[in-house]
Image: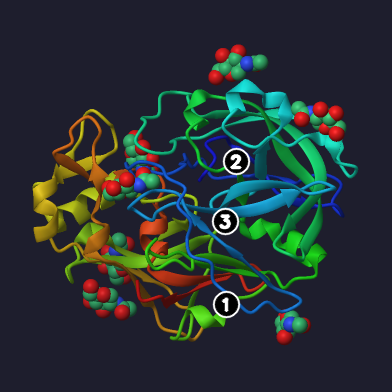
Amino acid sequence: MIHASSLVLVLAAATAAFATTAPHSAAKLTLSSAPSTPSARRARLTASPAAANDTSEQLFDYFNGTDLQWYGDISLGTPPQKFTVVFDTGSASLEVPGTACGLPCKNQRQFNSSASSTFQDQDFATTITFGTGVGVDPVDGDNWELWLEFVADVLSIGPDFNVPLGGFFLITNQTSTFSPDPFDGILGLSPDGGSLFDSAGYPEIFGMLFTHEDAGGAELTLGGVDTTKFTQPLVYSPIVDDGWQLSSQAIHVNGKSASSLVFNQSLTIIFDSGTSNILFTEDIALAIYKLISPDIVANKDEPGTFGIPCHRIPTLPAVIDITFAGIAGQPAFNLTIPSSELSSGPFKSKPEVCQTLINVSEGFNLVGLSLLKHYYSAWDIAGARIGFSPNGF
Ligand SMILES: *[C@@H]1O[C@H](CO)[C@@H](O)[C@H](O)[C@H]1NC(C)=O
Ligand SMILES: *[C@@H]1O[C@H](CO)[C@@H](O)[C@H](O)[C@H]1NC(C)=O
Ligand SMILES: *[C@@H]1O[C@H](CO)[C@@H](O)[C@H](O)[C@H]1NC(C)=O
Ligand SMILES: *[C@@H]1O[C@H](CO)[C@@H](O)[C@H](O)[C@H]1NC(C)=O
Ligand SMILES: *[C@@H]1O[C@H](CO)[C@@H](O)[C@H](O)[C@H]1NC(C)=O
Ligand SMILES: *[C@@H]1O[C@H](CO)[C@@H](O)[C@H](O)[C@H]1NC(C)=O
Ligand SMILES: *[C@@H]1O[C@H](CO)[C@@H](O)[C@H](O)[C@H]1NC(C)=O
């Protein structure tokens, strides 16, 4: 998820009196996109080795069938109150509903600050607007908005990741577009969050595994990577600009490229675990679709989306190779989105037409779960790089 607002507040450990404010690129953003029925089916529990300075968390599948949105458990306060959150590499702050929200948040757990002995009010209110929401509901102005109160308390993830959190947000009101969410909140894991790991005594790195729901075993590891989850060595690309962005040299579709898909490393792509599909600027999206099929066309009912009759999907190869720079001394490498990701399911308004995985965005490029689902990913804050190893899915 990328905040549409121009200011981003960063998760801050208690050592920093207040969250720092950092200017953010004018990205528009996204809660998620797979147009299928939300469900909260559980991924199978997995045993993973946990050292004293890392901890693994099971993740749960959000959508039924598309495996493109995952969330897990955290606790806040003393004694701990439990919440489910999307672990979102596209944003930088934590938002959960507070009891002040009441009715608009009735489907979600609400943090009761009076019941926590470590709670501190920071006396600051703000709002966040998102550029797109969950599912297929179209964005219309500010119809995805959260009203927030800035507070501080203790955050716990897993058995022993405990940190005093100097700044996060309680949701005091929200637009009704958020009601169907099966999770309570959003935990931003941008590369600005290093101090959080430091104060927990963990190395500044986390690992993520997303899978098919049937395979299970999806997890987040804080403070390390879970080496039981991949076999080939991780290959790394250095992050560039703000946030988790990598620099791309070219895109190939079914082995072919095009002049508008050769970037000489000038293209930066956001890696966002809180978004299901892919967003490219119009020239890039159209060039990719042209190489897949001329029959993929814009769906005027939902601006920015594209589709093709569903019966065509199984006949279309749509292997997308995106080439990324290696770290110093290492060669460039491809990350591959297989043909199985082409369809994100039928449009509600036109069930015979299936939505294809790329939306056109206004001025930024972003890959989400339809790519990340095929790799184990290592988000190395200290090393300013992201590593990938194919996970076999
Ligand atoms: C694509 O557009 C649809 C319709 O507006 C939206 O629901 C979905 O979230 C978008 N996907 C992305 C990745 O932005
Ligand atoms: C803690 O992290 C370091 C790497 O930073 C690692 O070498 C060590 O094995 C980890 N585990 C423990 C129990 O210290
Ligand atoms: C999940 O999807 C399958 C196939 O579309 C359907 O039969 C099943 O009822 C759905 N389950 C839930 C919990 O929505
Ligand atoms: C919040 O906690 C306080 C203290 O435990 C309790 O009196 C109050 O009823 C709780 N409020 C809600 C809305 O649960
Ligand atoms: C909550 O937000 C809605 C808009 O979604 C607004 O109509 C309503 O008045 C707000 N409620 C409060 C208590 O501010
Ligand atoms: C990426 O894949 C394309 C084929 O789709 C290939 O031509 C290119 O050499 C690959 N690049 C790297 C760095 O492996
Ligand atoms: C990439 O670099 C080559 C050689 O320097 C140049 O010919 C080409 O125009 C460049 N393409 C882009 C998209 O900048």
**Dot 2 crowding, Cα within 10 Å, few <14, some 14–19, many 20+:** many
**Dot 3 crowding, Cα within 10 Å, few <14, some 14–19, many 20+:** many
**Which residue shows up at 85% across the image and 52% down it?**
14
Rendered image: mark on residue 243: 3
Query: Please, is residue 191 above or below residue 358 in the view?
Result: below
Instruction: Tell whether label 2 touches label 1 (CB within 8 Å).
Output: no
> Residue 27 appears at what percent x and percent y?
49, 42
Amino acid type assigned to the residue bearing label 1 in the image: Asp
Q: Secondary structure at mark 3?
A: loop
Is residue 201 shown left or right of residue 267? right
Q: Secondary structure at mark 1?
A: loop
Q: Which residue is mark 2?
A: 184
Quadrant where the C terminus lies? bottom left
Say whether residue 236 is visible. yes
Specify the quarter for ligand 5.
top right
Foreground: disc 3 or disc 2: 2
Q: CA–CA distance between discs 1 and 3?
A: 23 Å
Q: Viewer-proximal residue, 82 or 207?
A: 82
Amino acid type assigned to the residue bearing label 3 in the image: Gly
**Which residue shows up at 42% across the image and 63% down it?**
372
Instruction: Tell whether label 2 touches label 3 (CB within 8 Å).
Output: no
The image quarter containing residue 201 is bottom right
Foreground: disc 1 or disc 3: 1
Is residue 258 shown left or right of residue 184? left
Is residue 373 shown left or right of residue 191? left
Query: Please, is residue 12 above or below residue 201 in the view?
Result: above
Q: Secondary structure at mark 2?
A: loop
Q: Which residue is mark 1?
A: 226
